[in-house]
Image (tube, rainbow, N blue to C red):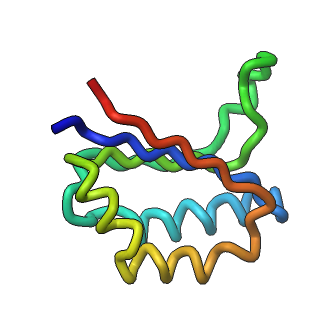
Amino acid sequence: MPKLAHHVFFTLADRTESARQSLIDACNGYLNDHEGVVDFSVGVREPGLNRPVNMDYDVSLHVIFADRKSHDMYQTAPRHLEFIAQQKENWAEVRVFDSNLC
């Protein structure tokens, strides 16, 4: 069964450093340590990389799950839903890319 990569790119309505840090803190507080997570990272866009292929976003979240079942449980986990409820007002755009890893 393949691992599943869950990549989320947030563009914030308030694009200040403090708003980015608030989202990073929330990700670290609510989205790590879920059952089936084998790797977790969150960070900000590297401003020095401005190639045309780089997307414009503020914060990226990367969660690798052991399998699809773990991902699906995460989507409905109370901590994940609480994170969304608390943070969504400052999201101008959210892009999610899920993929099976070979």
Residue at point 38%, 41% (across, down): 5
Q: Is residue 56 visible?
A: yes
Residue name at image x 43 percent, y 64 percent: 28
90 lies above or below 71: below
**In front of the other: 97 or 46:** 97
In depth, the one of 11 and 68 nearer the eye is 68
Say left or right for 53 vs 83.
right
Residue 16 visible (yes or no): no
User: Can you tell which quarter of the image residue 101 is in?
Assistant: top left
Number of numbered markers: 0
- Image coordinates for residue 50, horizontal then vertical, percent: 79, 22
Residue 73 location, quadrant: bottom left
Q: Is residue 69 above or below residue 85?
A: above
Q: Nearer the viewer, residue 14 or 5?
A: 5
Quadrant of image for the C terminus:
top left
> Percent position (x, y) of residue 79?
39, 79
Work out which quarter of the rendered image holds the N terminus and state it.
Answer: top left
- Return the residue found at the far left: 1
State the residue at coordinates (57%, 75%). Answer: 84
- The image quadrant of residue 92 is bottom right
Q: Position of residue 95 (x, y in %)?
A: 65, 48
